[in-house]
Image: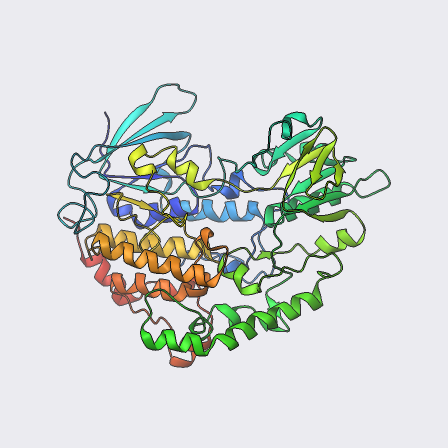
């Protein structure tokens, strides 16, 4: 056994970097399986992949973009450069161990087994243990041997995306084994260089299964390489339609007015709200519905949704509330108008030797089938955790019960960052890491296990009442209230604006959570014992 550090951070993506910066006082070790930091921005991107939000909405509170006024959405290479700059600025490279893959995590905390906590999460009411309670097994580089390290606390930041593909299941004789062409998942397509991707799709009949951001980006890339006389159209097979937006303006109004101000979120239910707020939500439901229809009216006017049969039946707010609203590439429908992208809707599909069969028995010929069917983030977690903890990852609703989006009440001395989504994942991950840093400094204690579960159950019930896609565990319609709770625990002011008008009607973003002078002084004055 080797160890001198107290905290392990598993994963070197956005969440892992934020955790490393906020836990620097504990000198953590960051285990990153690959040869680079960046997570999905390094390993799950295509040539055309861009951020879906403007630069100011995707930056750490204390590390702004140099060109943050640039209106273009940054490419994935620009984001990687930004993350490298962040790691350099805060001296994180010394904490990061690249090409060190965590293959197993063992609990060695003795009697503190899953389910035995009844009062406080952690020993003696403290989140970080006073002795090693986790063993982390690591394979470094090309080695076949496993090195084991002991830690008092582990932060899981391996994310929901990448590594483990979510693959459809088919009846016998109707899967990819009968297909004569090539089948690739998004995860495999990401690994192709530009020339290989072009060769894969040029002049080929391509079927793309899916209609979220990855599928849309692949369809545009396919259409672009198939321009010309020898080009072939690609066909998107869509099981569930979702709303997409062409820009962040709706009928000339900035998008943040509809969902990112305290007033706009007052229209929506939030967890653990009082009786008066619940009554107000009921009374304001027509206004809430009106906002959704107002946005839908613009999208139907702006985009040829009816022309292609792509208007979803569910309200726009359900996609926003489940973080499934995609920003469409400028040329997506232009390529469709040229006939290079086609659309087929089908609840079920399977393979035949020449392509895929839809649920109405339509046969689509294909040379290549690309599966944009997502990833299995929960399976990725359970493959690393001990069996008795892996079984606790999701509850009966299929959702990870994470208190403050970070702590599983029954998995001691461990935090999970990056598993609950919002429309600004960097912001929520960074704020949760600040909260985690305060927790590990001992600035506050966690509630009882029962209370933590009560709050997470209420959060899930709110999401169930808001959207049918609640299993994605997205907090976008009550993100400000979620941040309020984190601030209150840390002893920060939850209302971050300078006056009541801005507090009600100005958009909330990363820069609102820059630590104030009095908060920094309080933080620096506390020494962990």
Number of marks in the rendered image: 0
* Residue 98 screen position, x and y as percent: 41, 32
Reply above or below: 184 against 281.
Answer: above
* Residue 219 screen position, x and y as percent: 69, 45
Q: Quadrant of residue 11?
A: top left
Frontmost residue, 291 versus 187: 291
Reply above or below: 163 against 49.
Answer: above
Reply above or below: 225 against 501.
Answer: above
Residue in the picture at 34% in, 30% down: 104
Q: Quadrant of residue 97?
A: top left
Report whether 517 appears left or right of 423.
Answer: left
* Residue 236 screen position, x and y as percent: 69, 45
Q: Quadrant of residue 313?
A: bottom right
* Residue 186 screen position, x and y as percent: 59, 38
Confirm whether residue 198 shows in the render: no
Report whether 46 appears left or right of 403.
Answer: right
Frontmost residue, 504 versus 112: 112
Residue in the picture at 42% in, 81% down: 501
Residue in the picture at 70% in, 36% down: 356
Residue furthest right as drawn = 229
Report whether 309 appears left or right of 77.
Answer: right
What's the image's color scheme?
rainbow
Name the quadrant of the N terminus: top left
Confirm whether residue 265 shows in the render: yes
């Amino acid at each position: 056994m080797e160890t001198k550090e107290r905290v392990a951070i598993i994963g070197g993506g956005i969440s892992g970097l934020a955790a490393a910066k906020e836990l620097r006082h504990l000198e953590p070790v960051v285990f990153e399986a690959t040869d680079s930091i960046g997570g999905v921005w390094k390993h799950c991107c295509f040539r055309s992949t861009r951020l879906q939000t403007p630069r100011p909405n995707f930056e750490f509170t204390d590390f702004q973009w140099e060109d943050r006024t640039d209106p273009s959405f940054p490419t994935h290479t620009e984001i990687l450069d930004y993350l490298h700059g962040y790691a350099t600025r805060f001296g994180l490279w010394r904490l990061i161990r690249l090409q060190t893959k965590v293959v197993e995590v063992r609990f060695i905390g003795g009697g503190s087994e899953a389910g035995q906590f009844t009062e406080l999460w952690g020993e003696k009411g403290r989140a970080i243990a006073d002795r090693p309670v986790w063993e982390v097994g690591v394979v470094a580089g090309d080695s076949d041997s496993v090195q084991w390290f002991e830690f008092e606390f582990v932060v899981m930041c391996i994310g929901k995306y990448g590594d483990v593909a979510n693959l459809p299941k088919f009846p016998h004789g109707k899967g990819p084994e009968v297909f004569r062409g090539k089948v690739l998942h998004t995860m495999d397509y990401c690994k192709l260089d530009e020339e290989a991707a072009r060769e894969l799709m040029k002049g080929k009949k391509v079927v793309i299964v899916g209609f979220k951001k990855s599928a849309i980006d692949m369809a545009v890339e396919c259409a672009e390489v198939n321009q010309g006389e020898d080009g072939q159209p690609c066909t998107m097979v869509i099981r569930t339609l979702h709303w997409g937006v062409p820009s962040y303006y709706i009928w000339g109004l900035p998008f943040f007015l509809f969902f990112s101000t305290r007033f706009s979120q007052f229209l929506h239910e939030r967890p653990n709200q009082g009786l008066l707020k619940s009554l107000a939500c009921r009374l304001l439901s027509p206004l809430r519905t009106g906002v959704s229809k107002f946005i839908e009216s613009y999208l139907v006017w702006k985009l040829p949704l009816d022309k292609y049969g792509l208007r979803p039946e569910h309200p726009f707010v359900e996609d926003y509330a489940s973080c499934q609203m995609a920003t469409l590439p400028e040329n997506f429908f232009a390529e469709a108008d040229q006939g290079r992208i086609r659309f087929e809707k089908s609840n079920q599909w399977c393979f035949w030797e020449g392509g895929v069969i839809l649920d109405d028995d339509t046969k689509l010929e294909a040379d290549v089938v690309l599966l944009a069917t997502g990833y299995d983030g929960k399976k990725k977690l359970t493959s690393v955790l001990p069996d008795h903890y892996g079984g606790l990852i999701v509850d009966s609703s299929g959702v990870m019960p994470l208190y403050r989006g970070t702590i599983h009440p029954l998995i001691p001395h461990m935090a999970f960052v990056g598993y609950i989504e919002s429309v600004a994942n960097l912001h929520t991950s960074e704020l949760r890491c600040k909260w985690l840093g305060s927790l590990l400094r001992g600035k506050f204690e966690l509630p009882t296990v029962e209370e933590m579960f009560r709050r997470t159950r209420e959060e899930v019930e709110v999401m169930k009442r808001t959207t049918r896609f609640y299993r994605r565990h997205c907090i976008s319609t009550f993100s400000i209230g979620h941040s309020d709770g984190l601030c209150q625990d840390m002893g920060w002011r939850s209302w971050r604006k300078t006056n009541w008008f801005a507090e009600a009607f100005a958009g909330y973003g990363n820069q609102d959570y820059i630590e104030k002078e009095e908060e920094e002084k309080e933080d620096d004055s506390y020494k962990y014992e």
